């Protein structure tokens, strides 16, 4: 049951006994402990960092510990899996049918981040079919969302009078700047657009397009929206430009997180058993909600299933809201998880730039990478 629950790293998420004695912990405990043949729906709402995912995982783990099945899905991930099954070159219909039936008929289903999806007609149709079947068959279901209004995704009709509601308080708040991987505020202060050598090391011949890239980053960061991805060889100035962008947004009052991706993943792994601001949920919520997120060295991490899943969940959340996100990497977008690559290369949500220059650090020709043919062109 643990393996089939789809909880993954959340399999260890449990509340302490005193947390289940009152308040939200007591509400979700009573809902999870009810008999499966007792129809019931629960809607959990609250801002990022308020504890929605932790409470959801507690319900699933509590049931599994008692020998009863539970199924957990982030909705965007579920829809991606359904699309992939439907589009499979062989056996696609069967794979889709089995997956949809598995979710539709689960005795206890948790759908997390329900309002963080792209509300296409297909997505609305599948979610409606799924929830309508569960409502009619009396399957116990937990809906988890930031807002209580689901009309944008066509599901408001399921929020009936017999639905239990749990509204959580505010998110954990912190300072305006956070870093993972060593880009402390004192180090960050050393980087600016004025200090960027757009001519390269030895002259214009060393820098094919540094001046253009610099001006593009400056223009983007003046009114950031959507994604900006800088990819190219090592030492060509990508991190310098990202740090300069961070300084500019901090200067106007925005919150910024500068995360070196391998270090960020290590911090997330280490945070599962922590509480308060160091907890996994608090960190992950801050990454989703920060005004500007910088992911430095994406693709340099060890590509495990867990790492891919966490990066996808983070990026999917920011992608759907067009939250300003600046990414640097030394690999091609096509070398990433296909789910990430498709978002990085979506010209409707952002811009990808191939940075070409000599390595600043070694005075050697940087390892050049061939840009993807699907690289979006800058609009306007």
Image (spheres, rainbow, N blue to C red):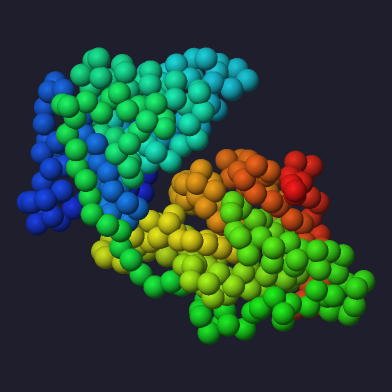
Q: In the displayed orientation, state which residue is furthest to the left.
A: 21
Residue drawn at x 66%, y 56% as measured from the top left: 229
Asked which quadrant contains residue 78, the reply is top left
> At which x and y percent is residue 312?
51, 46
Q: Is residue 146 visible?
A: yes
Q: Could you say which is closer to the camera, residue 305 or residue 126?
A: 126
Q: Quadrant of residue 348?
A: top right
* Image spot of residue 158 (x, y percent): 28, 25
Is residue 131 positioned above or below 360 on the image? above
The residue sitting at 32% across, 51% down in the picture is 47
Q: Quick one: 247 or 265, which is closer to the camera?
A: 247
Horizontally, is 254 left or right of 228 in the view? left
The image shows a total of numbered marks equal to 0
Q: Is residue 106 above or below residue 323?
A: above
Say which of 93 and 246 sits in front.
Answer: 246
Q: Is residue 180 visible?
A: no
**157 above or below 196?**
above
């Amino acid at each position: 049951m643990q393996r089939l629950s789809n909880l993954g790293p959340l399999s260890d998420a449990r509340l302490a006994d005193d947390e289940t004695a009152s308040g939200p912990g007591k509400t979700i405990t009573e809902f999870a402990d009810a008999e499966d043949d007792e129809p019931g729906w629960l809607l959990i709402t609250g801002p990022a960092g308020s504890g929605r995912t932790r409470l959801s995982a507690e319900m699933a783990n509590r049931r599994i510990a008692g020998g009863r099945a539970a199924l957990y899905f982030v909705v965007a991930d579920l829809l991606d899996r359904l699309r992939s099954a439907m589009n499979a070159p062989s056996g696609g219909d069967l794979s889709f049918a089995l997956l949809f039936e598995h979710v539709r008929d689960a005795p206890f289903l948790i759908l997390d981040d329900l309002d963080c999806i792209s509300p296409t007609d297909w997505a609305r149709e599948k979610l409606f079919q799924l929830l309508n079947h569960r409502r009619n068959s009396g399957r116990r279901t937990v809906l988890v969302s930031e807002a209580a209004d689901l009309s944008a995704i066509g599901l408001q009709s399921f929020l009936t009078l017999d639905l239990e509601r749990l509204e959580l308080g505010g998110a954990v708040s912190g300072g305006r700047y956070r870093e993972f991987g060593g880009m402390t505020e004192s180090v960050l202060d050393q980087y600016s657009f004025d200090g960027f050598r757009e001519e390269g090391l030895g002259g214009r011949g060393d820098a094919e397009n540094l001046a253009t890239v610099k001006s593009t980053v400056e223009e983007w960061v003046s009114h950031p929206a959507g994604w900006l991805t800088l990819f190219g060889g090592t030492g060509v100035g990508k991190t310098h430009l990202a740090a300069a962008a961070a300084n500019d947004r901090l200067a106007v009052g925005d919150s910024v997180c500068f995360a070196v991706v391998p270090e960020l993943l290590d911090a997330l792994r280490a945070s599962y058993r922590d509480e308060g601001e160091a907890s996994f949920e608090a960190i992950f919520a801050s990454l989703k909600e920060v005004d500007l997120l910088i992911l430095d060295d994406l693709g340099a991490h060890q590509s495990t299933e867990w790492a891919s899943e966490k990066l996808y969940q983070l990026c999917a959340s920011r992608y759907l809201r067009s939250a300003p996100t600046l990414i640097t990497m030394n690999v091609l977008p096509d070398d990433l998880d296909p789910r990430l690559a498709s978002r990085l290369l979506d010209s409707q949500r952002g811009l990808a730039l191939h940075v070409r220059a000599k390595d600043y650090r070694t005075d050697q020709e940087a390892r050049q990478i061939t840009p993807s043919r699907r690289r979006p062109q800058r609009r306007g």
